[in-house]
Amino acid sequence: METYIDLHTHSTASDGTLTPSELVLEAKKAGLAAIAITDHDSVSGIMEAMEAGKACGLEVVPGIELSTEYEETEIHVVGLYIDPDTPVLTEQLRAFVDSRDNRNLKIIDRLREAGFSISAEEIYRRNPGSVIARPHIARYLADTGQVKDVKTVFEKYIGDGCPCFVDRYKITPVQAVELIHAAGGTAILAHPCLYRLSRGVLLRMIGELAAAGLDGIEAVYSCNQGSDEKDYREIAEKYHLLLSGGSDFHGSNKPYIHLGTGRGNLRVPREFLDQIKQARRTV
């Protein structure tokens, strides 16, 4: 019987709503053979997830999703099999956290100026141990009835270009690949379908990343449309990249995305992980 995996998931260590151990148990319940925990710019959930995986017999891949910028477009690079204790990675993540904290305070100040009742103290109190980001702020406004729902908060107030939006510090995709490799990981370009880059710019970026050592591309993803998967598989072949895939599960922060199955028809084959492991052994 063919088994499936999910190599792109988020926990409360970033902007998911399940704790790392709850995420692992949900994956086990869903019948997945393995998952990767890939929180945004955070490794704080990895140990808990790994321990939960050992306890319930599920393979858990230690990972991360790094936020970067390429020609004013936010690009994400997933790292699989990273060592979360690598000093250079720890130092960079500390810089990300400091940047996020400053950004959160500025966003909250702008929301208060816009008439909302919100404080940094309350946001951080409600989300202990999490890397606080915009989804936590949006969830607070929705939960307290000040805005209809999280989607509306982003569309009207804190999404890119909105009145209370504040940009944040990012590294380049090439720097992300180098950082992931420094931490012993495998670097995967996440969800290329989301970037809305022209074909020429996307290929130029992937070419630059491949030259810098990019290992793979997320060819199977929840929001792929039409011939996207076929296209990304062809790009992977052209640049000699590994294939990866995942749901980008966030729990109730993205209720339309389900663990392992995405919007309902996602299937990431176990062979993707087997090929990633084989490539790591031959390096």
Image (cartoon, rainbow, N blue to C red):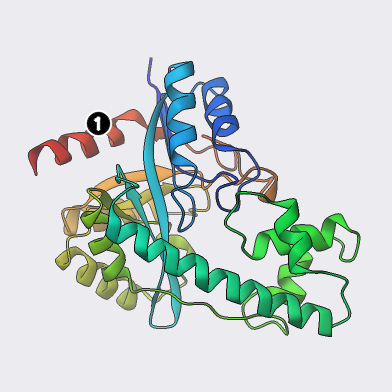
Instruction: Work out whether residue 176 or residue 260 is closer to the camera in this orientation and state it.
Output: 176
Q: Quadrant of residue 17?
A: top right
Return the x and y of residue 28 as percentages of the image width and height: 52, 22
The residue positioned 42% from the left and 30% from the top of the image is 50
Return the x and y of residue 274 as percentages of the image width and height: 25, 31
Q: Is residue 140 visible?
A: yes
At label 1, the amino acid type is Asp
**Left or right: where does residue 279 sit relative to residue 151?**
left
Instruction: Work out whether residue 39 or residue 275 is closer to the camera in this orientation and state it.
Output: 39
**Left or right: where does residue 76 sit relative to residue 137?**
left
Return the x and y of residue 104 as percentages of the image width and height: 65, 72
Q: Is residue 7 visible?
A: no
Q: Quadrant of residue 231?
A: bottom left
Residue matched to label 1 = 274
The residue positioned 26% from the left and 67% from the top of the image is 206
Return the x and y of residue 91 as percentages of the image width and height: 35, 63
Which quarter shows the N terminus? Answer: top left
Secondary structure of the residue carrying tag 1 is: helix
**Left or right: where does residue 149 sit relative to residue 41?**
right
The residue positioned 32% from the left and 58% from the top of the image is 89
The residue positioned 71% from the left and 69% from the top of the image is 154
**Left or right: where does residue 16 sit relative to residue 219?**
right
For the residue carrying disc 1, how many other residues have a C-alpha within 10 Å: few (<14), some (14-19), or many (20+)?
A: few
Instruction: Work out whether residue 96 or residue 68 is closer to the camera in this orientation and state it.
Output: 96
Relative to residue 152, is residue 25 depicted above or below? above
- Please identify the residue farthest to the left as the structure is shown: 282
Instruction: Work out whether residue 260 or residue 281 is closer to the camera in this orientation and state it.
Output: 281
Which quarter shows the C terminus? Answer: top left
